[in-house]
């Protein structure tokens, strides 16, 4: 977990540093970018349907191992990421490459108008599919206007 905390701190500083915005975007293909977006959209839709099994299936093997069951995973999302669990709306933004990680920016507005900007750490699987390998909160919760 110390590595995750250090990575999160690095990413927050990197994203919030003005020169970071001048960094090149991830140079993946349109098909790869679309597959990443589809993975995230599918997980959000699974949350909306209360389909823990489907949402959990889109997490990387490491995340699945960490949470062990779809129920544990859903409890974590409900407790820590309410705007993700019940979004009023969400917007997929830039796809970045930082220190070898593929990160997808996603902006959420929750049902209570709380907003969150998250970086989804995406991991390509051996079969070519993309899974979510963690989420880093870049922007704190704020109320949308």
Image (spheres, helix red, strand yellow):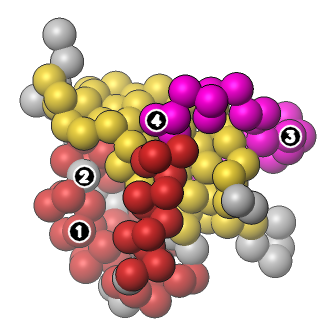
Residue under pointer 3: 27
Residue under pointer 2: 81
Q: Earlier in the sequence, mark 4 or mark 1?
A: 4
Label 3, label 2: how far apart the Cα atoms are:
29 Å
| Quadrant of the rendering where the N terminus is positioned | bottom left
Q: Earlier in the sequence, mark 1 or mark 3?
A: 3
Above-or-below relation of 130 to 145: below
Question: Is 21 covered by the magenta stretch?
Answer: yes
Residue under pointer 1: 76
Magenta stretch mostly in which secondary structure? helix
Q: Which disc, if any, is residue 64?
A: none
Residue 120, x across and y down, in percent: 52, 52
User: What are the residue bounds of the magenta stretch?
Assistant: 15-42
Residue 140, x across and y down, in percent: 24, 39
Report the side of 69 relative to 64 (left or right). Answer: left
Label 1, label 3: how far apart the Cα atoms are:
32 Å
Question: Is 75 covered by the magenta stretch?
Answer: no
Q: Earlier in the sequence, mark 4 or mark 2?
A: 4
Image point (38%, 43%), residue name: 138
Q: Earlier in the sequence, mark 3 or mark 2?
A: 3
SS for callout 3: loop
Label 1, label 2: how far apart the Cα atoms are:
8 Å
Q: Is residue 54 visible?
A: no
Report the side of 46 relative to 120 (left or right). Answer: left
Residue 20, x across and y down, in percent: 62, 34
Q: Count neighbours of disc 4 (C-alpha within 10 A) and say few if under 14, some if 14 to 19, many if 20 or more.
A: few
Q: Nearer the viewer, mark 4 or mark 2?
A: 4
SS for callout 2: loop
Image point (26%, 61%), residue name: 77
Residue under pointer 4: 16
SS for callout 4: helix
Q: Count neighbours of disc 1 (C-alpha within 10 A) and say few if under 14, some if 14 to 19, many if 20 or more.
A: some
């Amino acid at each position: 977990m110390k590595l995750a905390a250090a990575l999160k701190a690095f990413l927050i500083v990197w994203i919030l540093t003005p020169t970071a915005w001048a960094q090149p975007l991830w140079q993946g293909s349109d098909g790869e970018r679309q597959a990443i977006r589809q993975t995230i959209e599918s997980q959000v839709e699974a949350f909306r349907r209360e389909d823990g099994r489907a949402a959990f299936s889109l997490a990387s093997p490491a995340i699945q191992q960490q949470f062990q069951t779809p129920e544990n995973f859903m409890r974590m999302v409900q407790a820590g990421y309410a705007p993700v669990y019940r979004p009023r709306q969400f917007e997929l933004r830039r796809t970045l490459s930082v220190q070898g990680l593929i990160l997808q920016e996603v902006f959420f507005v929750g049902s209570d108008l709380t907003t969150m900007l998250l970086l989804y750490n995406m991991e390509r699987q051996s079969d070519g599919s993309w899974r979510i390998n963690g989420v880093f909160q870049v922007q704190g919760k704020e109320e949308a206007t």
